[in-house]
Image (tube, rainbow, N blue to C red):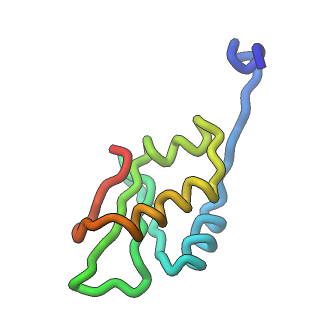
Amino acid sequence: MYRFYDGELNIIVAVDPGAIEEYLDQKDYNVKFLEEDHHAMEISRKESSAEDPKCMIISRHYFGRIPWEFLSLKWFLDGLVHKMESSPFTESEIIGV
């Protein structure tokens, strides 16, 4: 542990985009990975309408919590799905700016 804190040990965390797509697909959500400086991905309902245009844009900073804090990918995605299902917003919302 001390070697890690001293910078003598590097740990690389990789996230498979396919795993994210598959998990969100099972929850009836689409994911679009963004090639932007500040935003990592956009999540939207598969069955959205003009009356329910809800989508979330996840910032790179917020997405970066997965490797920086060694978060479980399932836990992270469950939190996003919960926010999508419980939030009263009607327009796009940016998470973790």
Residue 7: image location, x then y, percent: 69, 17
Residue 64: image location, x then y, percent: 52, 42
Residue 38: image location, x then y, percent: 36, 46
From the viewer's perspective, is residue 61 above or below residue 31?
above
Q: Nearer the viewer, residue 36 or 77?
A: 77
Residue 20: image location, x then y, percent: 59, 65
Q: Residue at x 41, y 61 (%)?
A: 83
Q: Residue at x 45, y 45 (%)?
A: 62
Q: Nearer the viewer, residue 40 or 84?
A: 84
Residue 37 in sight in this render: no
Q: How many marks?
A: 0
Q: Nearer the viewer, residue 57 or 26?
A: 26
- Identify the image quadrant of the C terminus: top left
Q: Residue at x 48, y 66 (%)?
A: 81
From the viewer's perspective, is residue 14 above or below residue 74?
above
- Identify the image quadrant of the N terminus: top right
Q: Residue at x 28, y 86 (%)?
A: 49
Q: Quadrant of residue 24?
A: bottom right
From the viewer's perspective, is residue 93 above or below residue 97?
below
Residue 32 in sight in this render: yes
From the viewer's perspective, is residue 46 above or below residue 18?
below
